[in-house]
């Protein structure tokens, strides 16, 4: 079966996310120290991270919308200190701006540019990256985000929705992501083929015998070569 569409995860697939989040949190905390010092004295970056983990365990809605989760924890801190809660939105704006200041891996722009001539391209993400702000939206024919769709990976529904948006059957689509369970297993259970993209900067590959990717690669160049071979076979 030919591969008519290729869909991608975003964070840690098209760009490294850990340094981006750390920088965004640092900038937001610096803003708090200047504009809401009582909040900054009461909470820390690590403390807010732990509080978000608690809320995710107790309220499933926060598993779908990470921005809403961050805002909830921040607003809670403002209320507890008596600071103007409206300022929480300003702090979130600082975070969101920095969160979208990503640096794509070197292979992203050239490879996606070439793939567009042969495949329909899409994205599926559990995160809150804004492709328009980042400047990559023009490369994709459709993008589905968990916070907007209402279901998150590895739910088969979000993969099916993305295939529908691209007007392709799941069997004719390949999903590419860094997470063996959320991306690879989730896509395969939705009837898609799946590539496990393990960037070298993410550390050594830790396989799971229960999940068998259709392809394991370390770059989009390797993915492109594999897709070219599938085209020849078809």
Image (cartoon, grey):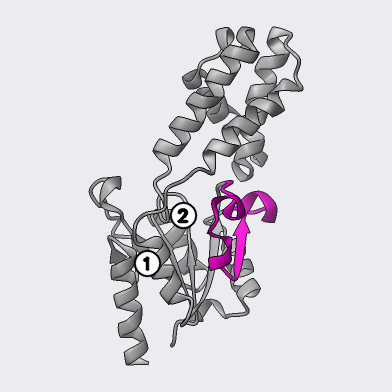
Q: Does residue 185 appear to the left or right of 142 in the view shown?
A: left
- Residue in the picture at 50% in, 43% down: 101
The local crowd at label 1, few if under 14, some if 14 to 19, many if 20 or more residues have their Cα within 10 Å, is many
Q: Residue at x 61, y 55 (%)?
A: 132
Give the quadrant of the N terminus. bottom left
Instruction: Give how far across and how far down residue 62 sits, in percent.
Output: 63, 38
- Residue 149: say if magenta: yes
Q: The magenta stretch spans which residues?
A: 128-152
Q: Is residue 169 visible?
A: yes
- Residue 58 in which image quadrant: top right
Residue 144 position (above or below residue 31): below
Frontmost residue, 59 versus 215: 215
Q: Quarter-wise, where is residue 2 in the image?
A: bottom left
Q: Nearer the viewer, residue 162 or 86?
A: 86
Q: Is residue 221 above or below residue 50?
A: below
| Element under disc 2 | helix
- Is residue 59 visible in the rendered structure shown here? no
Q: Nearer the viewer, residue 199 or 192?
A: 199
Identify the residue shown where x is 38% and y is 69%.
111
Residue 87 position, x and y percent, is 72, 21
Count of marks placed on residues: 2
Above-or-below relation of 45 to 206: above
How would you rate the neighbour count of disc 2 (Cα within 10 Å): few for under 14, some for 14-19, many for 20 or more? some
Q: In this rendering, which labeled residue sits more in front, label 1 or label 2?
A: 1
Q: Secondary structure at mark 1?
A: strand
The Cα–Cα distance between marks 1 and 2, rounded to whole angstroms, is 12 Å
Residue at the spot 74% in from the left edge and 8% down from the top edge: 82
Q: Quadrant of the C terminus?
A: bottom left
- Disc 1 target residue: 195
Residue on which disc 2 sits? 182
Q: Position of residue 97 (x, y in %)?
A: 58, 38
Find out whether residue 174 is within the magenta segment: no
């Amino acid at each position: 079966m030919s591969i008519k569409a290729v869909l991608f995860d975003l964070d840690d697939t098209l760009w490294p996310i850990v340094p981006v989040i750390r920088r965004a949190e640092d900038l937001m905390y610096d803003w708090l120290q200047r504009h809401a010092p009582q909040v900054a004295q009461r909470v820390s970056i690590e403390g807010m991270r732990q509080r978000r983990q608690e809320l995710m365990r107790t309220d499933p809605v926060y598993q779908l919308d990470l921005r809403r989760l961050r805002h909830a924890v921040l607003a809670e801190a403002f209320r507890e200190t008596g600071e103007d809660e409206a300022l929480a939105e300003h702090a979130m704006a600082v975070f969101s701006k920095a969160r979208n200041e990503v640096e794509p891996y070197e292979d992203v722009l050239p490879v996606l540019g070439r793939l567009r001539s042969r495949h329909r391209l899409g994205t599926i993400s559990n995160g809150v990256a804004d492709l328009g702000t980042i400047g990559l939206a023009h490369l994709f024919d459709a993008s589905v985000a968990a916070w907007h769709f209402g279901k998150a990976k590895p739910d088969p529904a979000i993969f099916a929705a993305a295939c529908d948006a691209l007007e392709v059957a799941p069997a004719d689509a390949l999903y590419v992501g860094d997470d063996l369970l959320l991306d690879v297993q989730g896509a395969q259970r939705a009837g898609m083929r799946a590539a496990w993209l393990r960037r070298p900067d993410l550390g050594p590959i830790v396989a799971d015998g229960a999940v068998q990717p259709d392809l394991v690669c370390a770059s989009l160049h390797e993915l492109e070569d594999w897709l070219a071979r599938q085209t020849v076979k078809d």
